[in-house]
Image (spheres, rainbow, N blue to C red):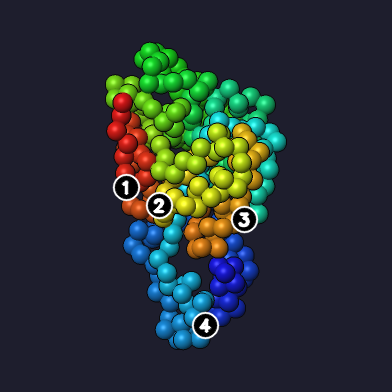
Amino acid sequence: MKKAVCTFLAGVFLLPAAACARPVEPDLSDYASGMAEIPVEILGELDEETLADLVEEPKYVALTFDDGPREDTTTRLLDGLLERGAAATFFVIGQQVPGNEGLIRRMKAEGHQVGNHTYSHVRLITADMDTVVEEVHKAEALLTEAAGEGSFWLRPPYGRIGAERAELIHTPMIYWSVDPQDWKLLNKDKVVAAVLDAVRPGDIILLHDFYSTSVDAALEIVDRLQKDGYDFVTVEELFRIQGVEPQAGVLYARPDRTRSLD
């Protein structure tokens, strides 16, 4: 529907077809101030279904992937996201970077966010302080070498980190608000059903690009939710859209909800 609406408006305003494509790095500066108004004379020419699609409140969601990259599954996932014009956030394990630097560069080039999932997926909740620093910084160094300078937000493995250790983290930390346990189910249909049953605008969905069933599920989730009016953005974009300035060392389940530290 959104593609049809975009095509209609392009025809009305004599816009080039390229104007309908999602840019690699969209300008989100005006999102917090609300939707742009559509001229009344244009609204009067639209059928009810198209009108409803245009004037409904935008629904944004962040799709996130842990434990990659893996050459076969992550490549297929990136191909599918590109085809669908959907952005995602990849929380990468440092040990997975060597040999997959091209995938990291591709993520960044295609508008995805790259995050840090520690070097070896260590349990930060029980690791000593020096290990916490080493695990985060070692992964960050590999990501910087592959993708260039950036702020690689942290997802603590298993979503857990203590308050004292969180003080060592110099980026925002991201938990999740929808977890279908795809790593446990290993079943596309069950994962899709679990997400669709729970998802709400503003959610952060947890999946793993290490599993083929999760890639299948992710692409179907995108297809189903896009038909329902959802737009897929990075976690960083989701915060910006909602007007929330994320703080270093804080663990967020959603931009509007923090998670208590252990």
Q: Residue at x 40, y 43 (%)?
A: 177
Note whether residue 70 is visible: yes
The x, y position of residue 9, in whole percent, is 55, 76
Q: Residue pushed farthest right? A: 72
Secondary structure of the residue carrying tag 2 is: loop
Query: At label 3, which amino acid type do we have?
Result: Arg
Q: Which mark is residue 256?
A: 1
Q: Identity of the amino acid at label 2?
A: Gly
Tell me what residue is drawn at x 54 percent, y 60 percent.
226
- Return the disc, 1 or 2, that comes first in the chain's sequence: 2
Give the residue at x 48% y 25%.
118
Cα distance between the residues tagged 3 and 2: 20 Å
Circles 3 and 1: CB atoms closer than 8 Å? no
Q: Which residue is mark 2?
A: 202
- Relative side of 159 to 50, left or right: left
Instruction: Examine the rendered structure and indicate whether residue 82 appears above or below residue 132.
Output: below
What is the distance, in whole Å, between disc 4 and disc 3 at their CAs? Answer: 25 Å
Which numbered tag is attached to residue 47?
4
Q: Nearer the viewer, mark 4 or mark 3?
A: 4
Q: Could you tell me residue 48's position as x and y percent?
A: 49, 81
Mark 4 to mark 1 CA distance (whole Å): 35 Å
**Would you say 181 lies left or right of 210 here?**
left
Up the image or down, 252 lies above or below 116; here it is below
Query: Which residue is under mark 3?
Result: 84
